[in-house]
Image: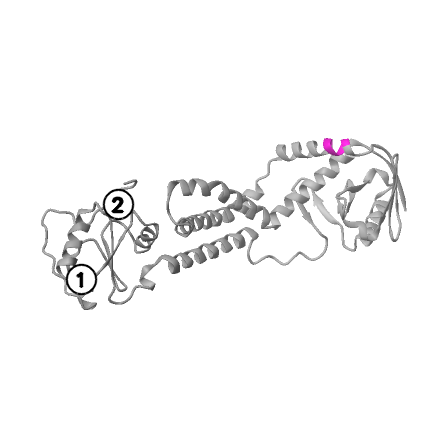
Amino acid sequence: MEIAYRLEESDLHDVQAQLVALRRAGLAASAWPFVGAVAGAAAISWPLWTALYPGRPLLLSLRPFAFALAAAATVAALLEPALLRRRSPRLEAWTVRRLARASARRSVLGPVAVTIAEDGVVRRNDEGELLLRRTDVRDVLATDRLLTVRLRRSGKVILLPARAFPDAGAFASARARLEALAGAPAVEIDVERGTASRPGPPPRPRRLRPGLAAALLLALAAAAVHGLAVRTYDPRRTNADRHVVLYATAWCPACARLRACLAGSGVPYEERDVERSRDALAEYEQLGGGGVPVTLVGQDVVYGLDRALLATALGAAGHRFDCPAASGRPERTPLEPGR
C-alpha cells in the first residue's frame, strides 16, 4: 500500500496535539511525576528546615521532616485525581503550537510518499528515502484525522493524515497494516479530553493509585527513620538499671538544686550538659525535653525537680534520696535558645 500527500504545518500541529494528549494520559498513570515533584519539594525545603533547627543531629532533623513530607505527599496524592482532571485548554493549545513550530524547523515540508509493506515502512520525501523495519516501529497513535507511527530509537514519527486516503476503508486498512507491524492495536487518542486508550477489554483497575503508593512508601521511610533515631539516640535502651543520668545546663537553678540533693544523698550520677553536647541534646529530646533538669534512672524518666517521683525512682534503684523543698522557686527551667 502506497500513500502520497503533501506534509503541511497543520499536520505537525495535529501530531503534536496527539503527543501532548498521550503525555497527559501517561502522567495520570505513572508515579514518577509525583515522585519527582515530592523530591523537588524536599530538596528545596530541606535547607530551610535545617536552618530553623541548627546544630541538631541529622537523624533528629530528618525524622520530623520525613513525617511532614509524608503527610504533605498523602494530602497531595488524595487531591491528585481532582488536579489531573483540571485541564487548561489555553496552556495545552500554547504547548501544541510551540512544539509544532519547533517540529516545523526540523521537518521537510512538501511531497511525501509512504509505502507500507509486510516487513516495514518506506518513506520518501525531498531529503531522500527512509527504510523502517518492523523492529523500528514503537507503536501507532490514531485519531479520526491522523495516523502516527512512532519510532523506537530516534524518537521521530511518520504521519499519515486522513486526507491522503480516498475513503474511510482505505484509512482503516492502513491502520490495520501498521498495527500488524507494531504488533499491538493502535493507541486511540482523544485530543479534546486528553486521554489515550487501546481498543479491547478495559485494563484492570489499580487497587492503589501511583501517587498514594508513593506517599505510602514515604510514610514507611519516615517510620524507618523514626526507628533508627530511637535506636541511635534513646538512652533508655542502653542505660543500666541503677545508673542515674542527669540532663541539665550550667545556668539552670533547678539543676543546681538537684545536683546538691543528689550529692547530699550520696547518689552517684552522670551529668550530661544539653547545651555543650549534641549527643546529650539528642538524648534529651528523645526523652521528651520540655525543660531541665531531666533525670534518667535506669529506664524511668523524671521531669524537673519532682521530689516524690525522684524518691520513688531512686528508691527502686536502691538509692536513698533526701531533698528539702525550696518554696517559691521553679522546679523546672525551660531551655533558652541561643544561650
The residue shown at (50%, 55%) is 216
The residue shown at (34%, 50%) is 278
Q: Is residue 141 left or right of residue 126?
A: left
Q: Which mark is residue 267?
A: 1
Would you call the spot at circle 2 few (<14 residues within 10 Å), some (14-19), or many (20 or more)?
some
The residue shown at (61%, 50%) is 30
Q: Quadrant of residue 262?
A: bottom left
For the question of whether residue 113 can be seen, the reply is: no
Asked if the residues shown at circle 2 and circle 1 are in contact, with their CB atoms under 8 angstroms apart, the answer is no
Q: Quadrant of residue 237?
A: bottom left
* Picture layout, residue 36 above or below residue 200: above
Q: Which residues are magenta?
A: 101-105
Q: Position of residue 117 (x, y in %)?
A: 89, 50
**Looking at numbered disc 2 in the image, what kind of residue is underneath it?**
Leu
Would you call the spot at circle 1 few (<14 residues within 10 Å), some (14-19), or many (20 or more)?
some
Mark 2 / mark 1, whichever is N-terminal? 1
**Looking at numbered disc 1 in the image, what kind of residue is underneath it?**
Val
* Picture layout, residue 230 above or below residue 159: below
Q: Position of residue 3 (x, y in %)?
A: 88, 42
Q: Is residue 144 left or right of residue 284?
A: right
Q: Nearest the camera: 175 or 229?
A: 229
The residue shown at (76%, 35%) is 12
Q: Nearest the camera: 259 or 138?
A: 259
Q: Which mark is residue 335?
A: 2
